[in-house]
Image: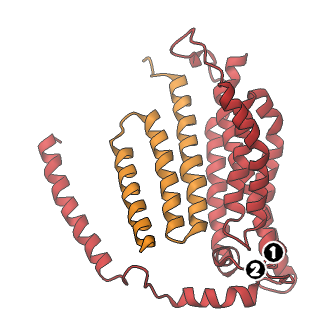
Amino acid sequence: MSETILQTGILIFVAAAGTAVVFNREPLSQAMVLSFYGLLLGVMFFVFQAPDVGLSQIVVGAVGLPLMILLALARVKKQGPKSD
Amino acid sequence: MTRRVRRIFFLFSSVALGWVFFLAYSSLAPFGYGESKYGDMVNAITVPERHITDAVTAVNFDIRGFDTLGEEFILFTSVIGVVLLMRRQKDEPAGDHEDQASGRVVPPASDAVRVISLLLIAPTVLFGVYVVTHGQVTPGGGFQGGVILSTAPLLLYLCADYTQFRRAVPRRLVEASEAFGAAAYILIGGACVALGGLFLQNLLPLGKNGTITAGGIVPFIDLGVGLEVSGGLSLALLAYLEELLEEKEQ
């Protein structure tokens, strides 16, 4: 019973976080929300008894991907819009 | 495409997607009751035949080890792609890169961030090494541990500065780490062939259940993958930070 509650709860959280990522239109804050969403996905995999996938998800989804997005954003901002 | 057309298009395609989704899911086994002969077989053989207690690692690095080789090279080539895109070209104008808001001083990291990052570095390295070396015993392995390890230099960048980051992650070292780690996978497979087996056939003594030497070739592959992933991600980080920060200091 408690397992079902846990699983339902995390699914709702994941759905909410996923919606939040989509509705966030500012790339910088979107990267932050995406990181949180990645973390929640990792917890979801753990709750559904796939700790291996959960670990990969946390390191890739919550750390790697947002980090690369942030760095790419910084790179794009540094260059600025083309003046021609 | 006007807003109206787009909305109609969305309506039709979402109904179609929903229908296909429903069809795909309605024939699945009920939640928690999935049956898979492959799964049962893996569960039955990993401990007695491979001495590996984490079935996922057994599948990834032994039973379908050749597939994982391809997956590892996906990461390898993406890192090469990042490095290639970020490389310094000779005729690249340096003046183009002025910060748009000129005169803005980037605020230094707060003391709290610096202290926490400093405290986290050693546990992160330890945990990364633990996850890499215990892939065959508990969930984890070279890939996960490698990413954890590659966050350690990043923490150093947060608590110190770019110069310290460069000292901790010399370009030659991470390049060598990535290249050697990727090569190790093929070399281990090749060694199995040279010893008279098949590519990646587990020929080494299997060791004692639940120890870091259990699993024959699997811990060695894990180490190689750990080197490859930590080196590769550090190299990508280095390429980005180099491109972002180096001109500022000149």
Is the C terminus of chain B in the top left, top right, bottom left or bottom right quadrant? top right
* Chain B: colour as depicted: red
Write the residue at 52% across / 40% down: A69
Above or below: residue B217 compared with residue B112: below
User: For the residues marked 2 and 1, what is the alpha-carbon distance in whole angstroms?
Assistant: 6 Å
Quarter-wise, where is residue B190 in the image? Answer: bottom right
Q: Residues within 10 Å of mark 2 (few under 14, many from 20)?
A: some
Q: Earlier in the sequence, mark 2 or mark 1?
A: 1
User: Color of chain A here?
Assistant: orange
Any mark on residue B190, and which? 1
Does B205 sit left or right of B80 as displayed? right
Q: Do we see residue B50 in this rendering?
A: yes
> Hey, which residue is sitting farthest top in the picture?
B103
Q: Quadrant of the N terminus of chain B?
A: top left
Disc 1: host chain: B
* Chain identifier of the residue bearing label 2 in the image: B
Mark 2, residue position: B199
Question: Dots 2 and 1: beta carbons under 8 Å?
Answer: yes
Residue at image location 16% in from the left, 56% down from the top: B11
Mark 2 and mark 1 on one chain: yes
Does B207 sit above or below residue A38? below
Residue at (80, 64) in percent of width and height: B184
